[in-house]
Amino acid sequence: MLDRLDQQPPDALLALIKLYEADPRPDKIDLGVGVYRTADGATPVFGAIKAAEQRLIDTQDSKSYLGPEGDMRMVRALEPHIFGKTLPSDGRIDGMQTPGGTGAVRLALALAKKSGVTRVLMGTPSWPNHAQILSDLDMELVGFTHAGADGTADMAALRAALANAGEGDAVLLHGCCHNPSGIDYSHDQWDEIATLVKDSGVLPIIDLAYQGLGHGMEEDAYGVRKVLPAVSEALVAYSCDKNFGLYRDRVGAFYAQGATADDTVRIMSNAAALARANWSMPPDHGGAAVRMILEDEGLTADWLAELEDMRQRIRSVREKLAAASNAGGVNLEPLGRQNGMFAMLPVTKEQVQALREDHGVYMAGSGRINVAGLTTGNIDKFVSALAAVTS
Ligand code: LMR
């Protein structure tokens, strides 16, 4: 029976990790999967995480099961960072831990489906796994153009998509640091989106996977903090994998806002049942380290300082690329106005291949680069290679 299965291609983005590792060229450049890199090209463990892990080793006296909701103290400790210091006390927002941001997205979409949502509006291009999860759940993806020709978010396309949608539909929005384009909604645009979503009756699902890497922890939460108070129901998928550098430890959280506190209790009981059926409970170690940081003022300050250094470095790489202005046929100037780790370059699949094979520059086939993979040591080489394949 199992021989009926069709061969699946490896995940294109994750396959790049192995391709890059197998390349013997010492000056190869990895702009593929979204991990932060220092000016030396390393992806170190945060100092605050190391300190928290040490405390965990010294004090943890059991690894017995928690439950499908995972570490609720971690989930609570994240809330002021996501929703603001004055979380409404009406009991309408609740959450649970998930295996990474992917687990949170999966849970949000599965829950939406269980509530009767069949169509999900989403700006495209988006993170490829969004479409993959929708397809796996047998939900219809209704795409609209995310970025307009002027390099800002295409609000006309979003308005039109919402005008043609209604109750029973959901819209999946990137909270900040849009993956793959780096093109975020401005504050004015979020103000409008909050009203549009409210008026449309569509269920908003906000994927917040890069908080702190755009303009800062508070600034990057603007969209969530604008949309949730405007609507009665909303879901949020959160990742700690990037802003705590925990990637392989898989730390995320799912939050739901119900129309009433009683609704929220029922929503969360369904989320717990879905989690139990999918992964039973999330891995604990990384989440426990996050909790230890967030419950300790000193460690929180250390973590925020490390995150700010990362953000500043990403910003400075973007400024250097923008200052280079042109690389052959590619205008790099817009990258200075974008946010977070990613940017889309207008390159063909053949040019992406030539960059990899002829120059040792690894990037997604879509033309997405992880700007954090660039350093003072390799940025000139990257700009020359880009110019060579696009001139
Ligand atoms: C990325 O987009 O590179 C990251 O979110 C990693 C992943 O899981 O795809």
Image (cartoon, grey):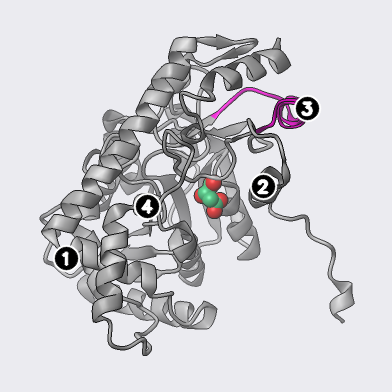
Front residue of this view, candidates 194 and 364:
364
User: What residue sits right under mark 2 in the picture?
Assistant: 21
Q: CA distance from mark 3 to mark 2?
A: 21 Å
Q: CA distance from mark 1 to mark 4?
A: 37 Å
Q: Mark 4 vs mark 3: which is more N-terminal? A: 4
Residue interval drawn in magenta: 344-361
In the rendered structure, the answer to whether residue 384 lies left or right of residue 275 reads right
Residue occupying the point 50% across, 29% down: 374
Residue occupying the point 84% across, 78% down: 2
Residue 167's label in the rendered image is: none
User: What residue sits right under mark 1 in the picture?
Assistant: 295
Q: CA distance from mark 4 to mark 3?
A: 43 Å
User: What residue sits right under mark 4 in the picture?
Assistant: 201
* Amino acid at circle 1: Glu
Front residue of this view, candidates 218 and 379:
379
Q: Position of residue 105 (x, y in %)?
A: 47, 60
The quarter of the picture where the C terminus appears is top right
Residue 350's label in the rendered image is: 3
